[in-house]
Image (cartoon, helix red, strand yellow):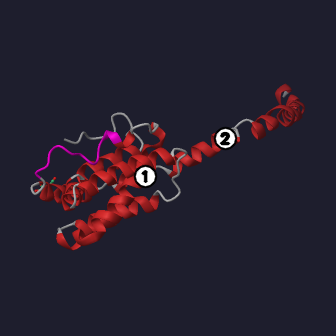
Amino acid sequence: MAFLQALPKSFSGWVIFCCCCCLPLVLTGPLPPRGAWVASTAHHACRLRRINFQPYIRNHTYTLAKMVQVSDHDTDNRLIGQQLYANIKENNHCYMMKRTVEMVVKDVLLTEAKNQYLYAKEVAEFLASLTQQLRHCVSRQREHIEKNLEEMKRKMEELGENGKTKAIGELDLLFDYIENACTDAPKKGGSKKRN
Ligand SMILES: *[C@@H]1O[C@H](CO)[C@@H](O)[C@H](O)[C@H]1NC(C)=O
């Protein structure tokens, strides 16, 4: 009984306590500073869900790349590689890959290639769907990124028609690069190793 009698009193005590102490905490506590909010939104815009990278589309992309690799005898040049990330901070890698993929789709896959090779059209559509999902992804390093992209484009154009062939032969690399740059690391123990 002593407990029941004490209840209303302690209850109103709690109400006062909550209004004075907890409410201000609730209102101010969980809201991060605006800068952090903007940064996390920008990060979110540069993320792709792993479910995009289905085994069948990986297979078709790799198959297309392998088919074309046999007609590329130039082993000195590489278009898709770490040089694309030169001077680019890691949190801008996804944007770098978004721009690279946009370029490859427009300048390589959606040219004669799309009717020339099996899976080319399908892979172009898949890659375009990724860049569409990344449409709000932006970067503060755009100048550096465009410079690296221009460098790659210049290299490709120098190689003439073989430049396009090489770019298609490296679609397997591009697939891995955009997957790694734009998806979050899999949870520990939750992923299968791919060979
Ligand atoms: C794609 O899948 C087919 C059929 O399952 C398989 O034979 C082939 O080796 C795969 N290709 C690649 C590049 O993984």
Where in the figure is residue 111, as x and y percent of width and height? 28, 70
Q: Is mark 1 within 8 Å of ligand 1?
A: no
The residue furthest top is 2
Q: Name the residue under label 1.
A: 48
In the image, the residue with mark 2 has its CB under 8 Å from the nearest atom of ligand 1 = no
Q: In the displayed structure, would residue 103 be above or below residue 194? A: below
Looking at marks 1 and 2 on the same chain, the residue that comes earlier in the sequence is marked by: 2
Q: Distance between the residues labelled 1 and 2?
A: 23 Å
* Res. 150 visible in picture: yes
State left or right for residue 75 relative to residue 140: left
On the rendered image, what quadrant is the N terminus found in?
top right
Q: In this view, does 26 lie to the left or right of 73?
A: right
Disc marking residue 126: none
Q: Percent from the top left, x then y, of residue 41?
A: 58, 48
In this view, 98 is above or below 6: below
The residue type indicated by label 2 comes to Gly
Residue positioned 24% across, 70% down in the render = 114
The span picked out in magenta is 73-83
Q: Can residue 126 be seen in this view?
A: no
Residue 20 figure quarter: top right
Nearest the eye: 139 or 18: 139
Quarter where residue 19 is shown: top right
* Secondary structure predominantly adopted by residues drawn in magenta: loop
Q: Mark on residue 35? A: 2
Question: Which picture quadrant has residue 59?
Answer: bottom left
The magenta stretch spans residue 14? no
Query: Which sits in the foreground, 183 or 146?
Result: 146
Residue 192 position, x and y percent, is: 26, 41
Secondary structure at badge 2 equals helix
**Left or right: 111 as drawn, with respect to 181:** left
